[in-house]
Image (spheres, grey):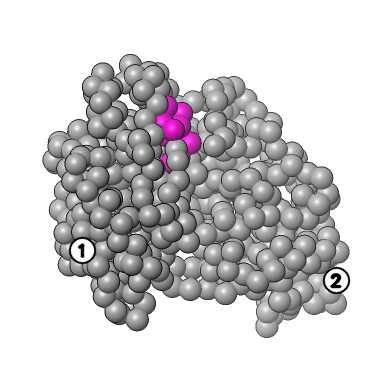
Amino acid sequence: MEQSGRINGKMAAPRFMIAAPKSGSGKTMITCGLLRALLLRGKKTAAFKCGPDYIDPQFHETVVGAPSRNLDPFFTDGPMTRYLFGCHARSADVSVIEGVMGYYDGLGGTSVEASAYHLAQMTETPVVLVMDARGMSLSVLAELKGFLEFRMDSRIRGVIFNRMSRGIYQLLAPMVQETLDIRPLGYVPESEECRLESRHLGLVLPGEVENLTGRLDRLAEILEETVDLDGLLELAGTAPELSIEMPAELRQTLDSLEAKEIRRAAPVIGVARDEAFQFIYADNLRLLEELGAKIVFFSPLHDSHLQEGLQGVLLYGGYPELYAEKLSANDSMRKELKTALEAGMPCMAECGGYMYLSQQMEDMDQKTWPMVGAVPGEIYRTKKLGRFGYIRLETGQDQVLGGGCGPLRGHEFHYFDSTDCGTVFHAQKPNRKRGWECMHGSRTMLAGFPHLYYYACPGLALEYLKKCCEFGGTKSCG
C-alpha cells in the first residue's frame, strides 16, 4: 500500500478536472480514455474521483495500473483535501480529476457544497466540461454559456463535445473561442467504446466488461485523433501551485502515544475483498497502515477459514446480494467469523459487509439465505434507492469503539434494508430535516449501512486499532 509520507509546503501539480452538466454525459469513459491516451504518451498520471463513488476509481485503476483516489469536499475540508491530493499527485506528470453528477450539484440538491465545482475551487483546478451534444448543434453553446455564467468564477476553461460529428465540431469550435472565450478541446464521436452497462448501484465493475483493455486502447486512439491532448496538458500546466500541509488533527493522531504503541504492536487486520466485497476506499487502508496496522485480505466467498493471528476484521461494501447463495453455502467461514466476533474480535462493517453479518439476506430474486448472524436484523430487497446521499452521524453512547469515533460523516447508497438497522448513531441529512437512527455498536463493533471515510475522523481509525491491540493481548495500546 502506498504511504503518504510527511509532505509540507507548496507543490507544483499540473492538473485538470473532467466535469459535465449531468450524470450520463460520458465523464467516466472520456476520463478513462484520456488517462489511457496520456499513459500511451509516456505520461505518469494520477487519477482522482470527486465524491464517494467506488466504481469509477476502479475503472481509473484499470487504465493507469495504480490506485485512484477519492477527493470529497463533504468528507474533508480544504486543507485535508489538498493534503490528500498532494500525497497521491506528487510524483505524477499530470493529475486528472473526474467530477461527480452535474458540475454544480451539491448537498441537498440546492447547494454547491460538496459538488465538483466545490472541489475545483478547493484545489484551484481548471475544468474541462464534457457536453453531451446528441440531438443538438448551436443549442449546445447556449447550455455551455449557462454553466459558464452561473458562478462568477466557474473555473471552466475548456470544453469537449461528446457524441458530436467532426463536421459539426468544425463549425462550432471557432464560435466557442470567439463568443464564450474558452478553449474548444475537441469532440468524441458516437462510439461503442464510450458506453458502459449499468446495474442498480451504478456501472458494472471493470472485470465484467468484455475486452475492457482493448476497448480503452481503441478509445485512446479515437481521442488522440479528435481531442487536443496537447491543449489539455497545456491547460493542466496553468494550475497554480498548491499549499500542501498535513492538517493538525491528522498530525496529532499520527504522532500520539497511542499511535506509537499501535506501530510497535503492528496488529494484523483482515479485510474482506473478493467479487462480493469490492467497495474499499484505498485511503482508509492507507491511514490504517500509517497508524501501524498490517493489512491482509480474505475472501468470504472462497476461503474456508480466517487467517490465523487476525486481531480485527473489516467488511466493506459491494454486491453480496449477487452472491448470497455462495456466501451462505460457505458454512465454515460464516461460523468461524461469528465465533471470532462473539469472542470480541473488533470489527467494522458497512453496507454490503453489514448485510453479510446480519441474520439472513434476500438475493436479487428475493430468495432468503442464512448469513453470519453476528448482528440482529433480516436484510430484504426494497427495489428502490433508499436513504441516498451524505449524512452526519452523532452518537451519545460512549461505549462504541471506546467513545472516540464521533461525530462522523458518511454516505448511504443501497437498494436493500434491514428489519433492524440499529440505534447507536443518529444520521442527519445535511441541509434537510430528515434524520433517522442507525448502526449497531459495542466496544468492539460498528456495523451499519453508512459508508465511512477515515480521514474525515482519524480518531475512528485510532480507536478501532486500539481495540484490535487489546484483542491481540497488547494492553498497552489501550
Q: Amino acid at mark 2?
A: Gln
Q: Which region of the structure is painted magenta?
A: 284-294
At 36% from the left and 39% from the top, the residue drawn is 308
Q: Amino acid at mark 1?
A: Gln
Residue 194 lies in what quarter of the image?
Answer: bottom right
- In the picture, which quadrant includes the C terminus? top left
Is 135 above or below relative to 473? below
Which residue is tagged 1?
359
At 14% from the left and 41% from the top, the residue drawn is 396
Which of the two marks, 2 or 1, is nearer to us in this view? 1
Which residue is tagged 2?
170
Please check the rendered image and state whether residue 243 is part of the magenta-colored stretch, yes or no. Answer: no
Residue 142 x/y as whole percent: 65, 71
Is 306 above or below relative to 102? above
Q: Main secondary structure of the magenta part?
A: helix
Is 429 above or below relative to 189? above
Residue 227 x/y as whole percent: 80, 61
Is residue 167 at all visible to an observer of this figure? Answer: yes
Which sits in the foreground, 100 or 60? 60
Is residue 459 at all visible to an observer of this figure? Answer: no
In whole angstroms, how far apart are the C-alphas of marks 2 and 1?
61 Å
Label 2 vs 1, first from the N-terminus:
2
Residue 341 x/y as whole percent: 23, 46
Which class describes the residues within 10 Å of circle 2: few (<14), some (14-19), or many (20+)?
few
